[in-house]
Image (cartoon, grey):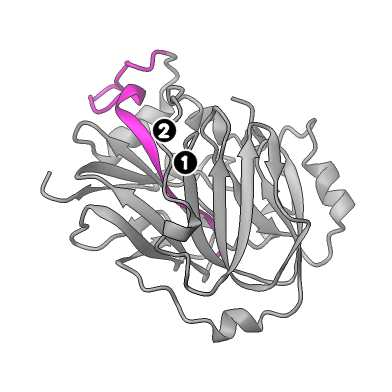
Amino acid sequence: MKRLFTIVAVSLLFSLVAPVAAQEATPGASESLLAGLGYAELLIRADGADVELPDQVTAGRTLIVYENVGQDSTHPFMLRLPDDLAVDEALADLGPEAMEPPAWFLDAEFPGFVGETLPGQTSFAVVDLVAGPHLVLHDSAVLLDVVGTDDASVTAEDPSADATVSLFEMGYEFPDTIDAGRQVWEVTNTGQEPHELLLVSSTVPVTAEQIIALFSSESEDENATPVGGGPSFANIDPVGGLGWLSAGATGWTEVDLQPGHYAAICFVFDPETGMPHLMLGMADVFTVGDD
């Protein structure tokens, strides 16, 4: 599966998950818990390498509606370019020949985005967009110009959240109990580095150490389990989350969780080692409902 994430060595890991068939369609924006709250809407439709989105949107609190109409699972995210970086230079740095992230990459601002989205599904997130050139990173970098002032973020009310989650170095803080069903999570990065909340479900009980071992495995057999046991890639599926989020930022994501076992992982890369945060220990597990 070809993705822009290869420049940060992320899809090299998550693309090991077995290919997934198209899923039943999720609720449209009119049925979403985050829709109807008065936020401006940014609709993005992805079909493989083709991504449709408007040329520009107005700064402020924004509902992202991301439709995956392609055949592969997608893991996009968004960044605002540093003020001293020209758009043409950034696009060149992220071109098809790029083999590693440019030096400025972690100096960008990450407002949050939808999480991994399966084919045939629609994901929702509410984030605060600051005026300036943004890139949506998918199989390629797509320019989005955010214009105007940021007053809408200051005056907008926060979505009503069913749960609050914190991200930090190198872990997560979840509520003591998490109910099943469709719900809104408020996600805040309380750390000093960018992080993300990538959620996966597991059909078998799992520990954080087993998740790290699984994604560290070099086996091409989707049914192979890592040393020490735990799930194989055939046992896990992505179930959304919230994309890259800068330190101090908050975003809201909509998830639909069935009773069972879950893990949270982060593929933001460490600038010194080039390793995803997951490999540095940023994984956590939780259960939903009475399972």
Label 2: how many Cα within 10 Å (few below 14, some 14–19, many 20+): few
Question: Disc 2 designates what residue?
Answer: 23
Q: Residue at x 55, y 54 (%)?
A: 65
Residue type at numbered disc 2:
Gln
Place of residue 122 in the rendered image (x, y in percent of width and height, measured from the top left): 49, 46
Q: Hey, which residue is sitting farthest left in the picture?
A: 290
Whether 95 is among the magenta residues is no
Residue at 73% in and 71% down: 131
Q: Residue furthest top?
A: 221
Name the residue nearer the viewer: 291 or 152: 152
Local SS, label 1: loop
> x, y (%) of residue 78?
64, 54
Total residue callouts: 2
Query: Is 91 situated above or below 159?
Result: above
Magenta segment: 221-246
Q: Which amino acid is tagged 1? A: Gln
For this orientation, the residue located farthest to the front is 30
**In this orientation, which residue lies closer to the viewer: 117 or 190?**
117
**Label 2: element kind:** loop
Kindly indicate the quadrant of the structure image that contains residue 49: top right
Provide the residue designation for mark 1. Answer: 121
Vertical position of residue 187 compared to residue 230: above or below? below
Circle 1 packing at 10 Å, graded few (<14), some (14-19), many (20+), is: some
Q: Quadrant of the N terminus?
A: top right
Q: Which residue does the image show at 47% across and 81% down from the upper left?
A: 157
